[in-house]
Image (tube, helix red, strand yellow):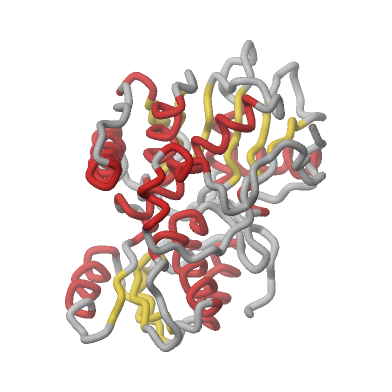
């Protein structure tokens, strides 16, 4: 095992291309996939935090050489058929990490990215993300709100030759990357890299990460509960949404694999609503304080839109059992190429 600032051991780990989801469901290996990430991402115990608690961290911020974060996992499947010269169309908030990741990974594949974004509360990390995305995109349209962005994207998707990448990468195909992440964590537990977490805490925006992990844990029979820290309005982020996503992804796997897969027990999904902060992208003092504690303890930076709020939720959980915080934000990687 390693400290939170070190790199994870690879002793006994499977080859990079032997994704756990392909070992479970070999027919899924026939799906087009862009190999963008480096997996498994490291796990480590965080020491030096106040109080007697056992908190682990999954470093998805380190899963790609140019721009990491949780979006890379979904984009491997969503960009599987992209070819040089293609045009990608996606949407998200003005400080969307999904828009940035799509533009960065699209450029690696020789594609152009057109982004439709909407204005919202901004924080320093969101401003940096917005600026980087604007430099990487071939075109950016910014609207006053998410509804107008959605309507504009519905019109733009009709253009010839445009490949639509859903907001947050949250559809059944993109979620395969996070089902694999859940299976990946189960294998790390089996190898003794960490104990079985009682709960895994993730930010909850579009929901693909939380729902995919929940399905992966169910398939692996890992008795771990997902704690989804809501960072967007409740109307678009709720437990019904998560369960709907798990069912859609399970149906896709069943159709391709030809056999039933495990279902997610609704009791394994908990949505935390009190770290939202009143608006998407708006900093929450408790979350900023939690981020400062992690930075002091391990030198790891969090953003105010997503990961700081999720880490604040993680710190509030009972300290009687191991908790895993899934770091979805890539703070590094300041290059634009």
Residue 122 sits above or below residue 23 on the image? below
Foreground pick, 46 / 280: 46
In this rendering, would 293 be left or right of 93? Answer: right
Res. 246 image quadrant: top left
**Residue at x-position 69% and y-position 71%:** 334
Res. 173 image quadrant: bottom left
**Residue at x-position 22% and y-position 76%:** 157
Locate the N terminus by quadrant.
top right
Locate the C terminus by quadrant.
bottom right
Q: Which residue lies furthest to the top in this view?
A: 320
Whether residue 191 is visible to the viewer of this picture, yes or no, is: yes
In this rendering, would 249 be left or right of 210? Answer: left
Q: Where is residue 44 in the image (x, y as percent from the top left)?
A: 73, 35
Whether residue 277 is visible to the viewer of this picture, yes or no, is: no
**Residue at x-position 45% and y-position 36%:** 229
Q: Where is residue 69 in the image (x, y as percent from the top left)?
A: 57, 55
**Residue at x-position 54% and y-position 73%:** 104
């Amino acid at each position: 095992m390693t400290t939170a600032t070190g790199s994870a051991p690879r002793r006994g780990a499977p080859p990079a291309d032997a994704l756990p989801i392909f070992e479970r469901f070999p027919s899924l290996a026939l799906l087009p996939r862009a190999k963008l990430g480096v997996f498994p991402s490291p796990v480590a115990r965080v020491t030096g935090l106040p109080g007697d608690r056992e908190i682990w961290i999954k470093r998805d911020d380190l899963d790609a050489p140019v721009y990491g974060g949780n979006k890379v996992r979904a984009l491997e499947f969503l960009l599987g058929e992209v070819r040089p010269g293609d045009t990608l169309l996606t949407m998200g908030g003005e400080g969307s990490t999904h828009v940035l990741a799509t533009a960065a990974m699209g450029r690696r594949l020789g594609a152009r990215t057109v982004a439709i974004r909407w204005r919202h509360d901004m924080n320093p990390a969101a401003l940096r993300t917005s600026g980087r995305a604007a430099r990487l995109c071939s075109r950016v349209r910014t609207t006053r709100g998410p509804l107008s962005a959605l309507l504009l994207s519905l019109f733009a998707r009709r253009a010839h030759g445009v490949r639509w990448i859903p907001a947050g990468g949250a559809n059944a195909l993109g979620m395969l990357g996070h089902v694999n992440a859940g299976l990946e964590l189960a294998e790390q537990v089996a190898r003794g890299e960490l104990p079985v977490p009682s709960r895994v805490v993730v930010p909850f925006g579009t929901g693909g990460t939380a729902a995919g992990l929940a399905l992966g844990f169910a398939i692996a029979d890992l008795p771990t509960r997902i704690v989804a820290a809501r960072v967007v309005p409740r109307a678009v982020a709720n437990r019904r949404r998560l369960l709907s996503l798990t069912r859609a992804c399970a149906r896709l796997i069943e159709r391709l694999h030809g056999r039933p897969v495990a279902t997610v027990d609704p009791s394994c999904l908990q949505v935390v609503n009190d770290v939202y902060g009143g608006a998407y992208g708006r900093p929450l003092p408790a979350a900023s304080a939690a981020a400062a504690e992690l930075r002091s303890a391990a030198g790891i930076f969090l953003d105010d839109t997503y990961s700081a709020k999720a880490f604040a939720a993680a710190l509030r959980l009972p300290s009687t059992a191991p908790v895993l915080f899934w770091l979805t934000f890539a703070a590094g990687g300041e290059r634009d190429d």
